[in-house]
Image: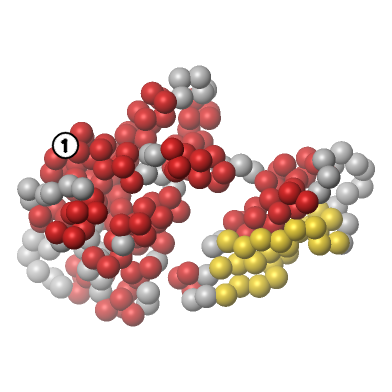
Amino acid sequence: MQELEKKLNYTFQNHALLEEALCHSSYANEHRVEHLSSNERLEFLGDSVLGFVTAEFLFAHHPDLPEGDLTRIRAALVCEQSLYEVAKKLNLGAYLRLGRGEESGGGRTRTSILADATEAVFAAVYLDGGIAAASALIHRVLLDAEREEVVEERRRDYKTALQELVQRQADQVLIYRMVGERGPDHAKTFAAEVLLNGAPIGSGSGHSKKEAEQAAARSALEHLPE
């Protein structure tokens, strides 16, 4: 645990909180031991702590943005994919306690499990060191300038932008189709292409069909004339 504490740049007074944050329900269910709890309650609390710290950060750093924009940016910052990326940076999967089924099924790399554990760790730090400690951690691993650029990129709707561009001319038909997928069920990558009047104009990939379609639309926008 000391290795993880170094990555978090935080030393726990109560190490049981960190152990609970890393205990998946599958492990707790298999090991019916008194005082052994899964991280689900911490995940619930961590979601609120993360939401508050992120809202406060955006409110202070973007005084000219209206409520709608602040809400959209916050949603992108605290989404499952963002939390999964934080977990990967911390190598959180290596420290999880998982049941046999989740372990054999690739739970250490499952997006939802890692995202939930990230929120649980935020809550554990909050309970151990207060809001200042939790805020410092969240700022360090999530709310940096580079992350905001990623969020801005993620929240752009390339499919809508492409639709608006092609509709400048009459009778234009856009169609998206999946052209492939690879990887295990818990970590699939999808490939998509977009066709304009039957002709391919862009392709892309992502961890969901929606993400792949957005990537294909972005590719098309980069190559189509304005």
Horizontal and vertical percent position of residue 112? 39, 60
Which quadrant, please, contains the N terminus?
bottom left
Q: Quadrant of residue 133?
A: top left
Asked if residue 214 lies left or right of residue 116, the reply is right
Q: Secondary structure at mark 1?
A: helix
Task: Give the residue furthest to the top.
Answer: 64
For residue 187, say whether it is visible: yes
Quadrant of image for the C terminus: top right
Residue 32 in the image: state x and y as whole percent: 13, 71
Which residue was labeled with disc 1? 130
Residue at left offset 43%, top offset 38% = 145
Q: Residue at x 11, y 49 (%)?
A: 12
One can see residue 80 in this view: no
Compared with 9, 203 (above or below) is below
Q: Nearer the viewer, residue 26 or 68?
A: 68
Which quarter of the figure has residue 38? bottom left
Residue name at image x 70 percent, y 70 percent:
179
Q: Is residue 25 above or below residue 49?
A: below
Q: Residues within 10 Å of mark 1 (few under 14, many from 20)?
A: few
Q: Is residue 66 left or right of residue 203?
A: left
- Check disc 1 and give the amino acid type: Gly
Task: Decide: is 141 above or below 216.
Answer: above
Q: Is residue 186 left or right of residue 30?
A: right
* Residue 115: x %, y % from top left: 36, 55
Q: Position of residue 51 (x, y in %)?
A: 35, 37
Direction from residue 110 to residue 15 in the image, left or right = left
